[in-house]
Amino acid sequence: MATTSDIKNGVVLLENGKRMKVMEFLHVKPGKGNAFVRTKLRDLQSGKIIEKRFNAGAKIELIRIDAKEMQYLYNDDDIHIFMDNQTYDQINILNDVIGNKINYLKAGQNVDILFDDELIIDIRLPAHVHLEVVSTEPGEKGNTATGATKPATLETHYTVNVPLFIDNGDILKVDTRSGEYIERTKS
């Protein structure tokens, strides 16, 4: 049995019979009283986020998560199809499980699918992805010293703010954790 010292961002624990993913945690040692751990937990079934305090050293039940590398194939309305790279079996994942990570998924990309037995818990993306700009306003020459930005729509229909020198067809490196533009890459 685990304790509160094992809590980290991204771990899944069983709380009141529900699988909860730790989104944030903070160990607090007040001047008076006992230490505790303040957490933000997301219910993996409903998506609801709750705040929960655990006394320091309290017993918690962590869930063992298995990760399997799979390739994203395509989406069909609110279902996304992934293929196991070893067995070539295909699985369907609903939009609710993927959430805003759909902004960084493109066909042929490998991601890790996280399972608890047969239940799909989450998908884990690489830290950075390379996406092509499909639509942006043309930049004006000589207007790059101000650090100004403009919106650019990427091949996944995600819009990100980019510097003025970015054009249609450029390949951008985008951070999947923050959703921000990092740099333009060579195609």
Image (cartoon, grey):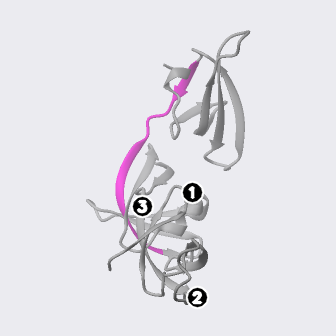
**Position of residue 24 in the picture relative to residue 74 (left or right):** right
Q: Nearer the viewer, residue 186 or 70?
A: 186
Q: Secondary structure at mark 1?
A: helix
> Callout 2, which amino acid?
Glu
* Residue 16 % position (x, y): 67, 30
Residue 146 vs residue 47, the one in the foreground: 146
Question: Mark 3: few, some, or many residues within 10 Å (few <14, many ≥20)?
Answer: some
Disc 1 packing (10 Å; few <14; some 14–19; many ≥20): some
Does the magenta segment cover residue 4?
no
The residue under label 3 is: 128
Q: Which residue is mark 2?
A: 137
| Marks 1 and 3, how far apart at CA | 20 Å
Q: Residue at x 30, y 65 (%)?
A: 88
Whether 114 is drawn above or below 60: the answer is: below
Q: Indicate yes or no whether the magenta region holds residue 70.
A: yes
Magenta residue span: 59-74
Q: Earlier in the sequence, mark 1 or mark 3?
A: 1
| Image x and y of residue 101, in percent | 53, 62
Whether tag 1 and tag 3 are in contact, CB under 8 A, the answer is no
Q: Is residue 74 left or right of residue 45?
A: left
